[in-house]
C-alpha cells in the first residue's frame, strides 16, 4: 500500500489549507485512516482519524473545531481541511492507514497504523 500526501505549504496565521492523501490500491475503503504531525524537535502527535465507514472522527483537542477530516472512498483519497491555522500548527503532516479495525482509543496511536505516507510540510507564519 502506498500513501502520497500533498497540499502542504506556507500560509499566514488565520489561513486555510487542505491536505490530501492518495492511497494506491483498491482496498482503501477497508482501512481506518489517520493524520499525524511532527513539529521540529517534537514527537509525532495525533491530529485526526476516520474509520473506514466514515463514522467516528476523533480529533486532537488542539485542532478540534478548526480541522475536519474526511475521505472519498471512490477516489481512494483522505483529506484534512485545516482552517484558522496557527503558528503552532507548523509541522510535517503524515497520513497513515490501518489495515484492521481499530477501537476508538487506538485510532489516536501511531503504533497502531500499518502504512505511512512521506509527509507534507505545513508552515504557518505569524
Image: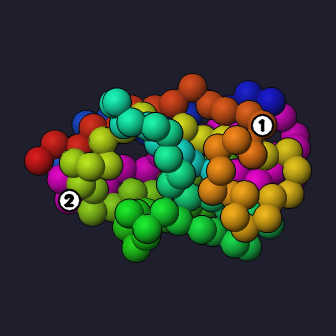
List the residue tagged with mark 1: 114
Magenta segment, which residues? 13-33
Q: Look at mark 2 in the image and give the residue it sits on.
A: 14
Q: CA distance from mark 2 to mark 1?
A: 33 Å
Q: Which image quarter is the N terminus in?
A: top right
Placement of 117 over or under 12, stated as above or below: above
Note whether residue 112 is visible.
yes
Name the foreground residue: 2 vs 47.
47
Image position, residue 63 (x, y; %): 40, 63
Please provide percent x and percent y for residue 41: 34, 30
Q: Report whether 90 appears left or right of 52.
A: left
In percent of width and height, residue 25 lies at 84, 34
Give percent across and percent down for residue 72. 69, 56
Query: Quadrant of residue 96 in the image?
Result: top right
Q: How many marks?
A: 2
> At 60% across and 68% down in the image, what residue appears?
58
Amino acid at each position: 500500500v502506498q500513501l502520497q500526501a500533498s497540499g502542504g505549504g506556507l500560509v499566514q496565521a488565520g489561513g486555510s489549507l487542505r491536505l490530501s492523501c492518495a492511497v494506491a490500491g483498491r482496498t482503501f475503503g477497508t482501512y481506518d485512516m489517520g493524520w499525524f504531525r511532527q513539529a521540529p524537535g517534537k514527537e509525532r502527535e495525533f491530529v485526526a482519524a476516520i474509520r473506514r465507514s466514515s463514522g467516528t472522527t476523533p480529533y486532537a483537542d488542539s485542532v478540534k473545531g478548526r480541522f475536519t477530516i474526511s475521505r472519498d472512498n471512490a477516489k481512494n483519497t483522505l483529506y484534512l481541511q485545516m482552517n484558522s491555522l496557527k503558528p503552532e500548527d507548523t509541522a510535517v503532516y503524515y497520513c497513515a492507514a490501518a489495515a484492521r479495525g481499530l477501537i476508538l482509543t487506538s485510532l489516536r496511536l501511531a503504533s497502531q497504523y500499518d502504512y505511512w505516507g512521506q509527509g507534507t510540510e505545513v508552515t504557518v507564519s505569524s
